Image: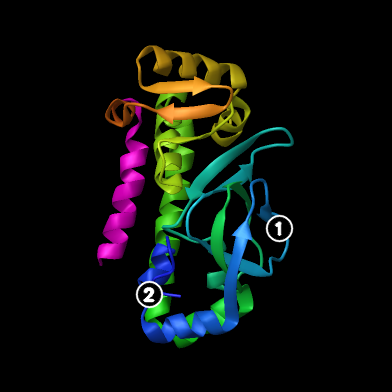
Amino acid sequence: MKGHPNCNQLIESLDSHCHHQLFKHGGWVELTSGQRLNTPGEATEYAYFPTGGVIALMMQQNMKKQMALALVGAEGMVGISHILGVDAESYASIVLTPSKAFRIKVKQLYGIKLKNSTFCRVLDKYVAVMYARFAQAILCHSQHNVQQRMASLLLTYSDCASALEFEMTQALLANLLGVRRSGINNVAITLQQMQILQYSRGHMHIINRASLLKEACQCYANDKDTYTRCFAI
């Protein structure tokens, strides 16, 4: 498992014994765009460690409105409630861009965690990171304007996808940010006029990442700092 192309960063941080235990009970799968990995409130059979791509953790605000709590790529995993011994997540996990992922049954994952102190520390650190991200997302939604939030989200999406160009419709952006599509259109036009983005027919190209970073709220940097700080301990 270690050394797999574009391997998941959590898996890469583990020792050889833990790799052996994971590989014994799980395997690699292809994740496809639009695939739903879990349904809120329902028991989930598997946890996933993506090697790339983008997975959105979506919280339902009401019957018509959603918002992304976080985006997950090769730095993380989907299924943090299960490593705490909880059967179901309170949010949906939806694949936005395809990738390979290491998939393991949640019962097996929890069992390995209980028997391996190194794995336990890695997963506990990641849980701390994700709960900090969830809190940051709620604060961001209430405190920052659409342009700041959209800039932060595009930077995070770019990091997860390891690309400056990707497919991104205004409808998807509106859904991830929990805002009206008209607001997304206005920001997209502004950022294009500032020569930060090129956007056409659902294709996004970040042409000036440094300027996009200046437009983003502090939440993007805070999320990055939280991950670095937790895994430096």
Q: Does label 2 or label 1 sit earlier along the sequence?
A: 1
Look at mark 2 in the image and give the residue it sits on: 121
**Which mark is on residue 41?**
1
- Whole-percent x, y for residue 30 in the image: 61, 60
Looking at the image, residue 80 lies above or below residue 190? below
Looking at the image, residue 17 lies above or below residue 194? below
Residue 124 seen in the figure: no
- Whole-percent x, y for residue 109 in the image: 55, 77
Disc 2 versus disc 1: nearer the observer: 2
The crowd level at tag 1 (other Cα within 10 Å; few <14, some 14-19, many 20+) is few
- Whole-percent x, y for residue 62 in the image: 69, 37
Q: Which element type, helix, strand or loop, lies under badge 2? A: helix
Looking at the image, residue 92 lies above or below residue 185? below
Q: Residue 224 in magenta?
A: yes
Residue type (three-letter) at the residue carrying disc 2: Arg
Does 53 sit left or right of 181 as displayed? left
Q: Report the front residue among 95 and 43.
A: 95
Q: Residue at x 43, y 83 (%)?
A: 18
Q: Residue at x 36, y 22 (%)?
A: 196
Q: Residue 128 in magenta?
A: no
Q: Residue at x 42, y 60 (%)?
A: 6
Q: Report the front residue among 205 and 95.
A: 205
| Dominant secondary structure, magenta | helix
Tell me which segment is drawn in magenta. Answer: 215-233
- Whole-percent x, y for residue 217 in the image: 35, 31
